[in-house]
Amino acid sequence: MTPELVTFGETMLRLSPPSGERLETATSLEYRTAGAESNVAIAAARLGTSSVWLSKLPDSPLGRRVTNEVRQHGVKPRIEWDNKARQGAYYIEQGSTPRSTTVIYDRADAAITTARPTDRYREAIRDAEVFYTSGITPALSETLYETTSNLLATAQQAGTTTAFDLNYRSKLWTPTEARETYESLFGDVDILVAAERDVHNVLDRQGPAEELAAELAADFGFETVIITRGEKGALAVHDGTTYEQPAFETETVDAIGTGDAFVGGYLARYIAGDSIAESLSYAAATAALKRTIEGDLAVVTPAEVEGVVENEERGISR
Amino acid sequence: MTPELVTFGETMLRLSPPSGERLETATSLEYRTAGAESNVAIAAARLGTSSVWLSKLPDSPLGRRVTNEVRQHGVKPRIEWDNKARQGAYYIEQGSTPRSTTVIYDRADAAITTARPTDRYREAIRDAEVFYTSGITPALSETLYETTSNLLATAQQAGTTTAFDLNYRSKLWTPTEARETYESLFGDVDILVAAERDVHNVLDRQGPAEELAAELAADFGFETVIITRGEKGALAVHDGTTYEQPAFETETVDAIGTGDAFVGGYLARYIAGDSIAESLSYAAATAALKRTIEGDLAVVTPAEVEGVVENEERGISR
Amino acid sequence: MTPELVTFGETMLRLSPPSGERLETATSLEYRTAGAESNVAIAAARLGTSSVWLSKLPDSPLGRRVTNEVRQHGVKPRIEWDNKARQGAYYIEQGSTPRSTTVIYDRADAAITTARPTDRYREAIRDAEVFYTSGITPALSETLYETTSNLLATAQQAGTTTAFDLNYRSKLWTPTEARETYESLFGDVDILVAAERDVHNVLDRQGPAEELAAELAADFGFETVIITRGEKGALAVHDGTTYEQPAFETETVDAIGTGDAFVGGYLARYIAGDSIAESLSYAAATAALKRTIEGDLAVVTPAEVEGVVENEERGISR
Amino acid sequence: MTPELVTFGETMLRLSPPSGERLETATSLEYRTAGAESNVAIAAARLGTSSVWLSKLPDSPLGRRVTNEVRQHGVKPRIEWDNKARQGAYYIEQGSTPRSTTVIYDRADAAITTARPTDRYREAIRDAEVFYTSGITPALSETLYETTSNLLATAQQAGTTTAFDLNYRSKLWTPTEARETYESLFGDVDILVAAERDVHNVLDRQGPAEELAAELAADFGFETVIITRGEKGALAVHDGTTYEQPAFETETVDAIGTGDAFVGGYLARYIAGDSIAESLSYAAATAALKRTIEGDLAVVTPAEVEGVVENEERGISR
Amino acid sequence: MTPELVTFGETMLRLSPPSGERLETATSLEYRTAGAESNVAIAAARLGTSSVWLSKLPDSPLGRRVTNEVRQHGVKPRIEWDNKARQGAYYIEQGSTPRSTTVIYDRADAAITTARPTDRYREAIRDAEVFYTSGITPALSETLYETTSNLLATAQQAGTTTAFDLNYRSKLWTPTEARETYESLFGDVDILVAAERDVHNVLDRQGPAEELAAELAADFGFETVIITRGEKGALAVHDGTTYEQPAFETETVDAIGTGDAFVGGYLARYIAGDSIAESLSYAAATAALKRTIEGDLAVVTPAEVEGVVENEERGISR
Amino acid sequence: MTPELVTFGETMLRLSPPSGERLETATSLEYRTAGAESNVAIAAARLGTSSVWLSKLPDSPLGRRVTNEVRQHGVKPRIEWDNKARQGAYYIEQGSTPRSTTVIYDRADAAITTARPTDRYREAIRDAEVFYTSGITPALSETLYETTSNLLATAQQAGTTTAFDLNYRSKLWTPTEARETYESLFGDVDILVAAERDVHNVLDRQGPAEELAAELAADFGFETVIITRGEKGALAVHDGTTYEQPAFETETVDAIGTGDAFVGGYLARYIAGDSIAESLSYAAATAALKRTIEGDLAVVTPAEVEGVVENEERGISR
């Protein structure tokens, strides 16, 4: 199989108390898996894209717990197995106004932090149409920064389109550190995805979203810049044209993973040859559906996404 | 015991994943039972009506699971036991905007599809004040159509009032098939209950609800026509008079079974001798309470229903 | 350890069906503990106050279930153990409009109903800065009325500030009985906390909340009167000055225990030497956070409470 | 319906932590119902006997929880509803060698403790073939002693066979108190069921089981005396003949309710006209099956019981 | 990928009440998937064999539930999707002496019953080293009998080794029907696996297991005949030599799927080139581990299986 | 409060799948806490010893989860809070013959690994009668080795009796590394507890247990040496006398924590002034009860332990 999409990054265990319970007093935890790059691969695979996820995991029941869940959704994992390193995890307690959602990362020294660019990784990337990774990966270790840089360059040299989501995480680094790293990688990025608040706070650029997108495209030579804006939807600038996409209305059950669902939906349609406007609409619908489902994953079908998209076009609000 | 209310129809297992989980990825299912005619009998029995439910079930733990739950609420089942046929089931995944609620029927060839009008059925119906069945029953098999027709006629001949809810299910038949069947049964129906959308789409009649009800009463000789209109409430036309009933405000936990709760509440008061206006109010309150409870069943008490009715009358919004 | 806060009262088992299920049909119950005075001690202890809870319990796994949970949050229980008496319990089914929340008390003849003022109780109270009990305690038995009266007097004589929350419960006594008891105790109370509806219905005083508070302070010589007003917030009158505190916006998961969280938050800051305005703000934030958590207990941290308080001050709505 | 079997006694809520958890630290409880006399009625009803259970319960969701479960198995409850009294409960933590099973009764002042012999009770008993109650009932209150005595006498006068199981509970009374009460009731008992250890410790009679049974029959004029002996099986003495019945081998999941299952199985066959030997075999098989099921109830079918009985006869060990 | 092992057959939903609960009274069900041929493919895939599973499923969340679980373990499903047919299921209640395990098949008219030999199926089989199916498949429909026959012949013609497990199910057909079908397929089978009791009861051959295996090999030209004998272990006859394999001692949690685990373990080593004796030992160890795990699937690793095998060889009993 | 027992060591989160499920495929985890030194403090505290546990934890909901559970059982935690370091965890999947129990430690770089001997630690130890730590603590980091050494010396200088359990963990270090460390600490140890297999494999001494204990006492000057021998019980050598203690029979639910329960039971009675023989008997009974309870903790009462001890003495087998 020649994969259409290849992603690279860390996937963690996701441990969360039942709804309304606190991490401090709960007696059981829901046990799932989550990671930006596998989330994107899963969303895309479920929507018809043949997808491969590259990573490094401990050779243990915990590492297998991760690959099992990724495979369940049709993504093919290509894993370096490590006999010693640990499996990263994160604990999440869902908030409720005025109680904030609590996230505790426990990912230091995870197996992936020593991942180097292997031939198997590079071969997969060269064969793919799109290679995706996010700004979390280079933040995890110096080695991973180098690997990310190398894999993006590998893709560029092979003619594989590269997509990169800033995914700024304040628990991993400072805005300044992040910006320097991002900018050193931008030369090998074709499609940039960024949350509007990260453009403001991390890339340190202010102004209307449309202008920021155009400015970024001009400064770094991106083919496409997509800015996501939460309830205000998203916009893309490509070849000087701006595309606006409102967000679909949702009753949110679990907001984590919304951005990854958006990217997975976008890339699935981009790879299938749809227009930017169509891909954005599909992305927004995938993201809206994700918010109704427990866990990080966009457990959706093409028919469901299309149903949401069409309702919008017909002006039906449901 | 001479029952006041007798109902006839299929009751299925109801299998549903936990809230926020999907049928495709869940690892446990809630395991309940559900069926329009037993739902109605249960609601009425809980509200004081002596009720009998007629059906045919497999002689297996699954068939007993169904009768156990029906008996729990005080309904007396009168069952034909089948040594071979299967137990019907339905899978339901609750939606959340913009994700739709998914219902998968798995009821083909259920034991009831071969049920014929037995003497035990007929005896129960002749003794009752009201016999109720719904438009689901004749849709399940040719045999069941004939049985339904026979039992409605039996009731009419015995002077038992007959009540019939269209309960159109697009997964069972087309609007045209349904309309033809309905109309062939209407001659033996005294009280017709119909959702407004089914009057439009299945009976193919357009216009204001009040006019449609009056028209139906005139065309088929119904004693009473009740049209349910979701959030807009319900109305009844009886003897040329129209009764309007607004819906009570609810925080919905599970909408399935609302219509059956409405009918059960109505029949309980109708049988007890209340006026149509009082019965409608009671019906709407029963339906509102049902929506706050997981599962198809209106697990309510007379005091709770009366509390809702009175709050309305006093203008208290809670 | 010299405790800063000592409370005295009953703590019950709290048994509740899963969300959306009814007590009448559920097959499992959540199993927690709850009691106004331990709730207050727990909230205060979690917010930094050294707290002791006085009570009497059966010497059984059920009595230990209660003390274990109280200790978990850092409160030191000082318990009289009873070899024979029973453990009180309450059953609670959360409502959903228009279904009311159902509370069934099963606390008659609980071990505490025979509690007399022991030297250990009195010693703890004399050492404390604040002694708190609520109007539930004297309602539980004649003996407990006498004990409550004795302990409040003990506190007053020792110079320990006394705080008392009316906590009127219509399932325990009539408004008239309650008022007479309350008024006989008021002479030994420094800080009175009362829900506005209890001032109206039980103390039988009508008028604007501010005036009622001032009137109560004048009539009974309270140092401070705090009136809680649900969504309208709270106000305190102290030394002729009125302090108003709006309620924080919440998405409510479980409303039970809100009042106790408010009192615990207030006393924690009062004991720490904060102003009345600051203490009220802290109290309201603690109460708002409590509403997002299953169970009676305010499982919160100082940082979380401060976060809510500060967001308000900065005008950030989140 | 003329019932074949009528029983009278208390049914409690049964609250138990998950397997391997302790009452002191668990956070959820399984929520079932249990009572010797409803257990017997349920076992018999499931095995084909038309059964009525007489009791008094609070008019609350908890009282309805009890009747719902009893009805589920086909028993018809005939209940006096009480607006004020409480619902009895018991907490049970299953042991595991060397940890004992812990039972905490919380049944004082339950609604039934004030039950008097009503006309409805008496009418049901007069119509029945067998009236059953156990030694728990007269232990619960002086009133209940009188009621039990009255109902046994009513049965005798009407020609209804009476069956009585000592069911000695050391948490309710002393052996001496129990013996005096038992002996005052024995004059109206036809079939006595007694655990061997209760014959030793409570009736204070020593010797081989066979002799004890014969002695009891002679002293009190019982038609039949059945002595249950745990793993050693059971024996009956009737008309001077002794019938021995070994116990069936079981993998025990939950031992509570075994004795009631035995009695229910016995009475079902006795009422159906089987011989004493056949009835004992059926009783032992019902008891063995009960031990494999969580909860007090013998959720079994005639086919299952017959399967166990036949395997024994054929010498098949499975 | 060229698969080493291809299997063909039905996979059902597997619905089971919690341990100690009955299907008749439970309120939740564990929700897994199970089918002889996917069980074998999963066991083999987990033990290092590249495996493909061929089947036909409904295009619904239920059909996807099945493929998701199969993929999770590394098997590649190749599915014909059906828009209309139903998903088969089975209900299982685990027994406990003397209560039998109850299995209720609900698989009539499942999607696979109309599966015909497609080019995609045939291509996969031709590429494989081993093709496996079981005697359940031809029992499900006349069409499936023809398809099974065709696919076995396809394999034989392509030089793919064929393996067939009788897997007689008395709920599907009579011994006579089964034997006739089996014998009509044996001509295209290389490796026969049969439970000893099925050789006796279905193939109607009596005698010592070793002789039966030799006799079958001679009569039908099997390359290898493996007879499984429960606690007595297994034996294989190949080329006139008999290999005996004792069973490993186990504490059984769930016995369902043991035979499939055995076959999966055997084929994994057979394909890897191990000797028959080594493969049998591996098979027995895989089967023993399966019995300690809930569900039909052998969720094991090569290291675990090897650990069990080696302990035996070293005579270590653990 | 002057504590009688002070312990020092790491406490982890304990994450385990439901019984019969695997870490690789489970979807929820039980969430408890566990650590040798808090386990010992909890067992002793529950048996009447005033106990303090010293540790270092992250200032997070996870660190509070740990202290909450420790406090629940009456132990007073004295914690250094760390704003950055992580909370250790361990994953445990219970085995079943022939599947081994799987333990995955995830404790590297836990907060405690940087714990230094603080004045608060030293003050607690100087005030105590016994200071306990185990061989796990010095294995966790170089810093912890120094701290352990320092705290043992502090205890010795203050006249506090020291107790040390080898607790060898092969996942933390080699036998040779462990032995060197142990021996460097033995000079400050009064009571040594060692599993027989660790004496063999780690201390590298062979021979009958009684001789090994005497030899160790002689070589290192221990006041008491206790050797635990699993099903063979335990023995102590003190002042030249040997005390033998058989193990109590148990049905094991969860074996983890048995050794800690033994030590906690022993120290509770040692501190209370009992003889060595009495303390050993109490220790063995505490250990036996622990095995019947899920989790690491000996959730037992003095009455339960005494019941087990007495049954043995009376020769009652239960």
Image (tube, coloured by chain):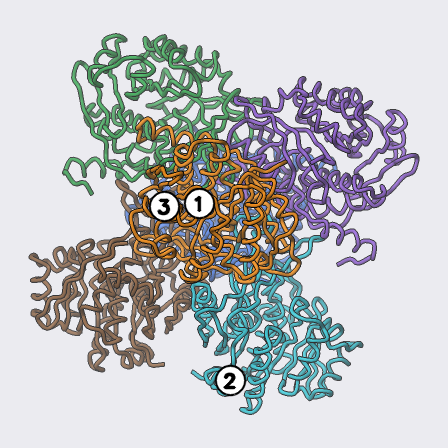
Chain colours: A green, B brown, C orange, D cyan, E blue, F purple
Instruction: Give the CA separation, mark 2 to mark 1.
Output: 64 Å
Residue B198 to residue E38: above or below: below
Q: Of callouts 1 and 3, which one flags the residue occurring earlier in the amino acid sequence?
A: 3
Q: Residue at x 44, y 66 (%)?
A: D64
Query: Who's the residue at 78% across and 29% down the image?
Result: F162
Q: Numbered disc 1: what chain?
A: C
Judged by depth in the image, the label closer to the viewer, 2 or 1, is 1
Contact, CB < 8 Å: mark 1 with mark 3?
no
Please give the name of the residue rendered at 38% of the width and 14% of the height, measured from the top-left corner: A175
Circle 2: element type: helix
**What residue is at 13 percent from the left and 59 percent from the top?**
B199
Label ID, residue C222: 1
What amino acid does circle 3 point to? Answer: Ala
Q: Which residue is mark 3?
A: C213
Crowding at label 2, few (<14), some or many (≥20) Cα neighbours within 10 Å? many
Which chain is disc 3 placed on? Answer: C
For residue D318, say whether it is visible. yes
Quadrant of the frame with the C terminus of chain B: bottom left
- Same chain under badges 2 and 3? The reply is no
Residue farthest along the right direction in this orientation = F240
Q: Which residue is mark 2?
A: D125
Instruction: Report the amino acid beneath label 2.
Output: Ile
Q: Secondary structure at mark 1?
A: loop
Residue E116 x %, y %: 34, 45
Quick one: SS at disc 3? Answer: helix
Q: x and y percent of residue C18 in the render?
A: 43, 51
Specify the quadrant that holds the N terminus of chain B: bottom left
What is the three-letter code of the residue carrying label 1? Phe
